Image (cartoon, rainbow, N blue to C red):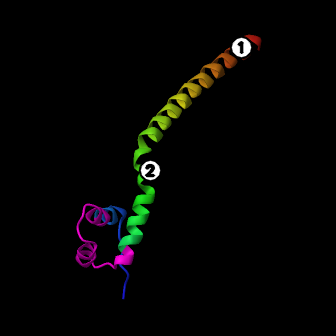
Amino acid sequence: MKRRQWDSKTKALVVLQGLKGKPIAEVCVEHQISQAQYYQWRDQFLANAPKAFESHKQDAEKAHLERRIAKLTHLVGELTLELKKSDEVWS
């Protein structure tokens, strides 16, 4: 028998049904999973929940680093042009 593949979005929706108060037995019957499987997904979901609140911080840090890279790339370009100009003067 072929095992089913569950995407992360579906797993989260299944877990949320149980967390919102729907009886776990009903959730499991509806989605044809074992209660052990539900509890594994729930534990994984809860263990990773803090990451949901880190994305903004990571996005802000990534944006800051991208601006810094752009600024430094521009500076390297300007310095390269100055160096070429000084080489032309001295040649």
Which residue lies under the disc numbered 2? 51
Given this view, does label 2 or label 1 mark the residue nearer the observer?
Answer: 2
Q: Given the image, on which type of amino acid does mark 1 rest? A: Ser
The image quarter in which residue 49 lies: bottom left
Q: Residue 53 appears at what percent x and percent y?
A: 41, 45
- Which residue appears at 35% of the width and 66% of the height? 7
Q: Quadrant of residue 59?
A: top left
Give coordinates of residue 71: x percent, y percent: 55, 25
Q: CA distance from mark 2 to mark 1?
A: 51 Å
Q: Is residue 17 magenta?
A: yes
**Residue denoted by label 1:** 86
Is residue 19 in the magenta section?
Answer: yes
Q: Residue at x 28, y 72 (%)?
A: 24
Residue that protrudes farthest toward the top in the picture: 89
Task: Indicate the position of residue 15 as horizontal and vertical percent values.
Answer: 32, 65
State the mark number for residue 28.
Answer: none
In the image, the segment drawn in magenta is: 14-37
Name the chief secondary structure element in magenta: helix
